[in-house]
Amino acid sequence: MKQDLVYTLAIESSCDDTSAAVLCNDTVLSNIVATQEIHKAYGGVVPELASRAHQQHIVPVVHQALAKANIDKKELSAIAFTQGPGLMGSLLVGSSFAKSLSMALGIPLIAVNHMQAHILSHFISDNEAIPLFPFLALTISGGHTQIVMVRDFFALEVIGETKDDAIGEAFDKSAKLLGLPYPGGPLIDRYAQKGDPKAFDFPKPKVADLDFSFSGLKTAILYFIQKQTAKHPDFVTQNINDICASIQHTIVEIVMDKLKKAVKQTGVNAIAIGGGVSANSGIRQALKQSEKNLGWKTYLPKFEYCTDNAAMIGIVGYHKYLKKEFSPLDCPTLARYKI
Ligand code: KG4
Ligand code: ZN
């Protein structure tokens, strides 16, 4: 190992993506992701199938990450892995692999919180802009919906989160009601771009403080579709663009209302977003507009660092390495793990 250079091998296996990355300090040398296509046939992630697929993918994915980074495993300084939150069977595949390799190579093991990793992905060196502390992080994906006050790499405070469905589930479950395949979020986005966002009115949930709730929206859409198709059987196919635009508009408004409240409450107007739903064109547009209309500063990491990936685990691993925050080999795997 060259002086001052920290080579981290990172492993992510919390849900349905098996990923391995190699970082040199805060720079990503490789970031390999094997997405599990098998779940598409079931309309959602099947935990047992996910852990089996992780077992098949993990060795080739790690080999590929080392090869692409052109690093021999003997040059590694540490192994970082996702400790949680996530699916227990999936997490166990990554954690067992990371523990065995750290023991075999005699290098430190670093356990990483997946939610902290989504946020610190903004600090990977090849992002367009790196946020300054303090900032508000909005993590939105199929599994998470959180607003976090970030004062430092390790001073994070959740100030709002969903009480039921995650925002990605709201997109995917709405899409399912419209007969669209899983994951339906990107399809709703695509149809929405051709539709009228004010065509139909869906209720916004009344949730206290900075918390979210999306389960009511799904029910409202279900009743709306049942009522309309009873009168016009082809209602959904004939109005798909307008329905999707209206659903997306409602979700974007829910997010923006909470962000405005968070900015007002904290006095912090720098917003960094992450998670798969940050690909949504409506959310991106609304955030861009906020820079002009509200004077906010917004940050979006490179797309490959938004969805689940090991590079984001590696950046947390690197910062923990600098603090010598290592984990024992018997550290637990945590399906629930608060920041
Ligand atoms: O972060 P991610 O890849 O995986 C996890 O949830 O862990 O996020 C996937 C979620 C899915 O719910 C998917 O429908 C949603 O992100 N998604 C979108 C868009 N692209 C992905 N939702 C709305 N609009 C999009 N363009
Ligand atoms: Zn995630």
Image: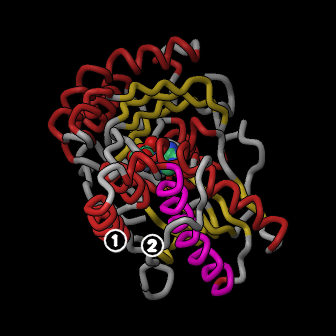
Relative image position of residue 328 (x, y in whole percent): 31, 47
Relative image position of residue 196 (x, y in whole percent): 60, 59
Q: Image point 23% across, 25% down: which residue? A: 55
Relative image position of residue 251 (x, y in whole percent): 51, 65
Q: Say which residue label 2 marks.
A: 202
Quarter of the image for residue 96 reads: top left
Q: Amino acid at mark 2?
A: Phe
Q: Are marks 2 and 1 in contact (CB under 8 Å)?
A: yes
Of 150 and 24, nearer the camera is 150
Of 312 and 191, nearer the camera is 191
Q: In the displayed structure, would residue 243 be above or below residue 216? A: above
For the residues labelled 2 and 1, the Cα–Cα distance comes to 7 Å
Magenta span: predominant SS is: helix
**Magenta residues?**
241-265
Looking at the image, tell me whether mark 2 or mark 1 is earlier in sequence order. Answer: 2
Q: Say which residue label 1 marks.
A: 220
252 displayed left or right of 111: right
Q: Image point 70% across, 61% down: which residue? A: 287
Quarter of the image for residue 46 reads: top left
For mark 1, does the 10 Å Cα neighbourhood hold few (<14), some (14 to 19), or many (20 or more) residues? some
Q: Examine the structure image and report whether residue 165 is included in the region drawn in magenta.
A: no
